[in-house]
Image (spheres, grey):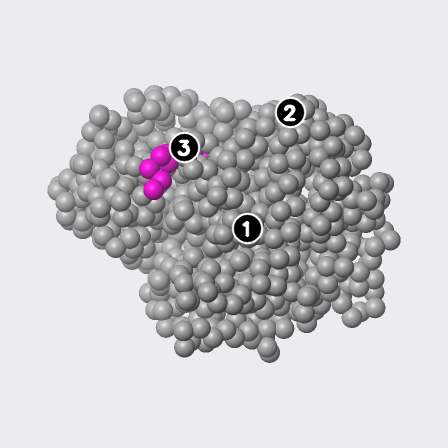
Amino acid sequence: MPPVENTRLTSAWRHWGPYLSDRQWGTVREDYSRDGDSWGYLTHERARSTAYRWGEDGLAGICDARGSLCFALAVWNGRDRILKERLFGLAGPEGNHGEDVKELYYYLDNTPSHAYMRFLYKYPQREFPYDRLYLENRRRSRLEPEFEILDTGIFEGNRYWDIFVEYAKASPTDILIRISVHNRADNAAQIWVIPQLWFRNTWSWDPQLLPKPRIRVESARCLIAVDSEALGSYSLSTNYESNFLFCENETNASLAPGAGVEHGYFKDAFHEYLINNNTAAINPVRVGSKACAPLILRLGGNDSSAIELRLCEGSREPSAPFDDSDSLFSLRRQEADEFYTTIQGEITLEEDRLIQRQALAGMLWSKQLYCFDVRRWTHGDPTTYRPPLDSATRRNSTWQHMFAYDIISMPDKWEYPWFAAWDLAFNAIPLALVDPAFAKAQLLLLTSEWYMHPNGQLPAYEWSFSDVNPPVHAWAAWRVYQIDKASNAGRGDLEFLEKLLHKLALNFTWWVNRKDNEDKNIFQGGFLGLDNIGVFDRNMQLPGGGHLEQSDGTAWMAMYSLNLMRISIELAEFKPLYQDMATKFLDHFLLIAEAMMNVGGGIRLWDEQDEFYYDVFHIPGSALIPLRVRSLVGLIPLFAVEVLEPEVIEKLPVFRKRLEWLFANRPELTNLVSRWLVPGSGERRLLSLLRGHRMKCLLRRMLDEQEFLSPYGVRGLSKFHKDHPYVFRADHEELIVRYTPGDSDSAMFGGNSNWRGPVWLPVNYLIIESLYRFHHYYGDDFKVECPTGSGVFLTLAEISHELTRRVCSIFKRDQQGKRPLFTGRHTLQCDPHFRDYLLFHEYFHGDTAQGLGASHQTGWTGLIANLLRRTHEEL
């Protein structure tokens, strides 16, 4: 029998989940400023008093799938000047390395239906150091590390609370909530625990939605929330008597004149009441659109206590709401354990199971309701928000078709609480391990008509939908298809593949028409995710009006061609007409490969002198200049590889005929990219940008520990550039690229983009996967020295396994019992209340593997779940 969790994956069970953002303030959606400064328009300070337009945020919160009714925790230690309702962090312009959350919190457990979830927040007992965190980070330069909350000493002497929030569903609309508070100090202390229930404000922008939803008192232990339009009625019961407090989820007009009604009980009422003793802020009639159930807990040293609540559908107080509490939590935990036992069947090491389970929990916690009607946002709301600029000049103004109202996998619900196209593609890979249906739906979503631009472009990310992310959607679709097929007794979801193929063919055409500057199959994608890795900000005007012939952009397109070819071949086995599409994408691949070898003027993206791929800077009327920066730009051609089985080709006569014609009539193309006439292991055939010699040249550099190979994976930039920085002179200015293993010292992309040295999981994952596919063709006879200069020669599968081991070691305890990602953090490394709670960072220091950047980017760093599984499969 499958785990109960697998049989529960219906839309009903997904109706409630962790869909509340960790940060709604500071986002583009909430920005109605004249200068487009989203960080400055709605700050953390203003967030407690300003009703959001497009979403909600909260601490360890949940909401229904339409975001109508929200529940989250608030706490107060009796000392803070701010009620702790949401996570604090620095805005992009405030941090010395860009935006950064300054809190300690962990996603500990979750299941795909969200029938069981567990979250941990660590809350200081001393006054929270808001000002110190802000001032010290503002004082520091980009050459210094970020100043984090642990650096303040606020947790010394264990003077903090561990607050665990658990959810267990009795049914799709019946949710038990347990909040366990642990005093980690030796001395007694007290804390206000303030569960909050509120309706998202929709009525302020659309008078037709009146009457307002209401929350009222049912008894001393129960609230009733009624929304006749969208949700119906819900009750929130407590296992303690509370003096319920009420207000409206409305902007405090005294702080933002003209933004709301002039008098009333505003969103910040609980803050005003508890901290400023402003009793007039609370509605004495005890009704509103926002309510809380405050309770003071007084706990002795090292003591703990728990409270429970029950949120369930219905317009009256349930009888005996907590009689089944213990048994339900026990049952849901047991079911979660059984589910992950099935998922982790190949993983034998308990530590690896812990790492993978927390990674997957983070993936599931990082779902968020993303609501954004670009047309309405652009033109403003007549009753409240007027458009501050001509709609034609507003950010994303060319995306008027876009209407988002969906549950989406986020890169990080605080740092990046908005989807990003290529992040989402990577996110789908670990999600496919636990919830392939959701992973497939996510990939389809961005290709739907309300996301994809009519011209075929996929939206990049909220800051600028028109930016360009690497085209990895087809790769992700193929991998998710394979994972799903393997878990479904070999039955693949061909309908999913077919839908995506048609939409991605439009996107591929957009790339060909828009990003091939001179129609010669060399691409200029711009940003492409590789923020600071190059000489220039590739989205800006380049010196002399020139443009880059991008090695990475072109290689991504070669990879895209092969991905779409492979999907077409899979479909052609069942619908032969797709053979024509397979040949189309094969032809594109061959033309791109030819172009990479001859940009013009005798210049190639492949540099014979250095035996490496480089971008080429093209100034009109001037020379073509190779930019000899040894970076991931030169390794991405590894990703364009496909191995075809002979029995597959035999089933496709039209495709086979085209192949035979090409090899007979265009040998100058086929000789560049394949060893078609030299069958590999098992008579397989290879299509790749890299024949044996070029691949060995790239691997020689990539596997050199003085260049790319870190103890923890492949770096973004060669360590060679530490002592030999690359210097480019243009317009009387020196532009320098230097190896920086940690946080960036460059101001490009806001100074928080850090490709110059650190280890990133997504590109390491692609490298590892590509090497396995090469090995699938070459077999065990093809060996490469690894590490370079060691005298040890390994097969490509063994090298792939070694890279997997190095990347996984970032999270695992070493021989001294320390995890490299916690390098320099004694408390995280050694304290028993910290050391087994993991953070999944955006990237990792290229020499030490210390976690850096966004600390909860379980998104693409969640790929560690797949890598751990692969490690044990190989063992």
- 3D distance between C-alphas at marks 3 and 2: 28 Å
Residue at left 71%, top 50%?
668
Report the side of 176 relative to 287 (left or right): right
Q: Element type at marker 2?
A: loop
Disc 3 to disc 1: CB gap under 8 Å: no
Label number found at residue 40: none
Q: Which residue is mark 2?
A: 577
Tell me the quarter of the image containing the N terminus: top right
677 lies left or right of 383: right
Bounds of the magenta segment: 398-407
> In percent of the image, x 74 and y 33: which residue is there?
656
Residue 120 in percent (x, y) is at 50, 48
Vertical position of residue 489 compared to residue 419: above or below: above
Q: Residues within 10 Å of mark 1 (few under 14, many from 20)?
A: some
Task: Judge whether residue 400 is colored magenta.
Answer: yes
Q: Amino acid at mark 2?
A: Leu
